[in-house]
């Protein structure tokens, strides 16, 4: 009988383009385990540590750093080098007093930017699913695989797909809600304008948004924009 399921490794030439790895040095690269982000939306922790952050020269060194629980993702130590990280994840390295957020980027799909320590426990997540469950409660799922159960008497009950939540990690406490509405500020997630921060001017089949820094109107699909604040981003989502 043939082998079923995905293999433990992936050919480098077939790996997602946004993985910042040499393609022809070796044949194989470790396949990330199923996790909060899909293969095309995330990066294995080993590649982040070695190739993007430059904290190790070799895979062996990177695996050792990760195994020693020196890398935290959203406030939790991660010791599996195949753990996948992605959009808006907070990467912390307490031994070096460094904190990063993975944000959209036109060239690399996602990239780390350094953030202040007081933001290391805060994360923006985008609501992708919404269903009513037993007891009339609302269940919403976010882009990073989180599930929130909202009781019907909660002030947060009127959530919609496309809204963003500012949460505290790792507790998963909802701090603020930013609806996908005109007047709010969003960041473009994919395409040649990924990483652009803009003010939402029209919500419809396409989202129309005005660049905050320069003249220009962007028209993007709702799934390709994330609300990040009311007048300005509530947390750091770009380098400048």
Image (cartoon, rainbow, N blue to C red):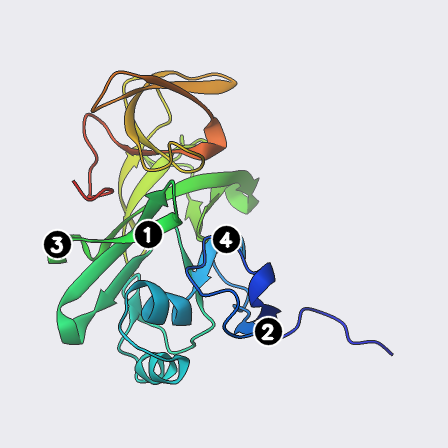
Q: Residues within 10 Å of mark 1 (few under 14, many from 20)?
A: many
Earlier in the chain: of badge 2 and badge 3, it is 2
- Choose mark 2 or mark 3, whichever is in front: 2
User: What separation in Å lies between label 2 and label 3 (alpha carbons)?
Assistant: 36 Å
What element does badge 3 sit on?
A: loop
Q: How many marks?
A: 4
Relative to 140, residue 37 above or below: below
Q: Position of residue 66 (x, y in %)?
A: 34, 78
What whole-number distance in Å separates the C-alpha atoms at marks 3 and 4? 29 Å
At numbered mark 4, what does the secondary structure look like: helix, strand or loop? loop
Q: Residue at x 12, y 58 (%)?
A: 117
The quadrant of the image that shows the N terminus is bottom right
Q: Nearer the viewer, mark 3 or mark 1?
A: 1
Which residue is depicted at the point 34% across and 83% down? 61
Q: Is residue 10 visible in this depiction of the protein?
A: yes
Location of residue 45 in the rendering, given as x and y in whole percent from the top left corner: 40, 68
Q: Is residue 60 above or below residue 124?
A: below
Q: Residues within 10 Å of mark 3 (few under 14, many from 20)?
A: few
Quarter of the image for residue 238 reads top left
Image coordinates for residue 22, horizontal then vertical, percent? 45, 65
| Local SS, label 1 | strand
Distance of label 2 from label 4 (alpha carbons): 16 Å
Check residue 9 in the rendering and tell me which mark sits there, or answer none. 2
Classify mark 4: residues with Cα within 10 Å, few (<14), some (14-19) or many (20+).
Answer: some
Closer-to-camera residue (236/25): 25
Tell me the number on the disc at residue 116.
Answer: 3
Task: Identify the residue under disc 1.
Answer: 111
What residue is shown with label 4? 17
Dot 2 falls on a residue whose secondary structure is strand
Residue at x 33%, y 70% (from the top left corner): 49
């Amino acid at each position: 009988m043939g082998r079923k399921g995905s293999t433990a490794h992936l050919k480098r030439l077939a790996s997602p383009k946004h993985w910042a790895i040499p393609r022809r040095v070796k044949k194989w690269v470790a396949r990330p385990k199923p996790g909060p982000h899909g293969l095309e939306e995330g990066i294995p922790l080993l590649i982040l540590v070695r190739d993007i952050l430059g904290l190790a020269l070799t895979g062996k060194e990177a695996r050792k750093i990760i195994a020693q629980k020196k890398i935290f993702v959203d406030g939790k130590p991660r010791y599996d080098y195949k753990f996948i990280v992605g959009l808006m994840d907070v990467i912390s390295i307490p031994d070096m007093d460094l904190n990063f957020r993975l944000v959209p980027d036109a060239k690399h799909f996602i990239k780390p930017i350094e953030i202040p320590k007081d933001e290391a426990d805060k994360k923006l997540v985008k609501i992708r699913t919404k269903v009513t469950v037993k007891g009339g409660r609302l269940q919403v799922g976010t882009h990073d695989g989180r599930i929130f159960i909202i009781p019907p008497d909660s002030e947060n009950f009127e959530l919609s797909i496309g809204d963003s939540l500012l949460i505290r990690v790792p507790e998963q406490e909802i701090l603020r809600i930013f609806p996908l509405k005109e007047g709010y500020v969003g960041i473009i997630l994919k395409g040649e304008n990924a990483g652009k921060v803009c003010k939402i001017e029209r919500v419809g089949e396409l989202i129309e948004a005005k660049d905050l820094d320069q003249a220009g109107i962007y028209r993007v699909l709702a799934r390709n924009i994330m609300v990040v604040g009311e007048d300005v981003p509530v947390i750091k989502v770009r380098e400048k």
